Image: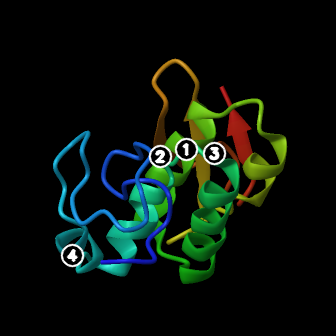
Amino acid sequence: MSGHPGFCPACFAPLAQEADTCPACGARMTELSSRDYREKLVHALLHPLADVRMRAIIALGLRGEAEMAEALVECAMRHPTDVVQGLEIKLPPAKPEVYCLSASKARVTQEPPEGGYSPNFIWS
């Protein structure tokens, strides 16, 4: 398969564009290209290049799937100094609730705030 990016889509090791198999992890490019688009987007959040992560963040945000919130938050927690990327992350609310982010646990919990619901972010 030719024309794939210079990284393995499975392990992100540098890869020649004409390679059919990744020398680092053994992944076959034809098998990886058949993965579900949503799965590819979530996996792209782990990519070492910020612009690739940003495209995945934007695409996941446009999809508006509430179950993607945890993957987006974990991406933000892995790159806390990337302010632009962090601002682009939009957590899609399934219900009007607050996403409480815990830096120590690096996971999302959904808790109703005292006094009602709000779509605001609370960092604890």
x, y percentage for residue 4? 44, 71
Of tags 2 and 3, the one toward the viewer is 2
The quadrant the N terminus occupies is: bottom left
Relative depth, front residue between 23 and 52: 23
Mark 1 belongs to which amino acid?
Answer: Cys
In the displayed structure, 20 sits above or below 15; it is below
Of tags 1 and 2, the one toward the viewer is 2
x, y percentage for residue 25? 21, 43
**Label 3, residues with CA under 10 Å away: few <14, some 14-19, many ≥20:** few
Measured Cα–Cα span from mark 3 to mark 4: 47 Å
Mark 2 belongs to which amino acid?
Answer: Leu
Kind of element beneath mark 4:
helix
- Residue under label 4: 30
- Residue under label 1: 75
In the displayed structure, 111 sits above or below 41; it is above
Nearer the N terminus, badge 1 or badge 3? 1
- Residue under label 2: 46
Relative depth, front residue between 13 and 104: 13
Cβ–Cβ under 8 Å for marks 4 and 2 = no
Mark 4 belongs to which amino acid?
Answer: Thr
x, y percentage for residue 72? 54, 53
- Residue under label 3: 113
x, y percentage for residue 12? 41, 47
Q: Residue furthest top?
A: 104
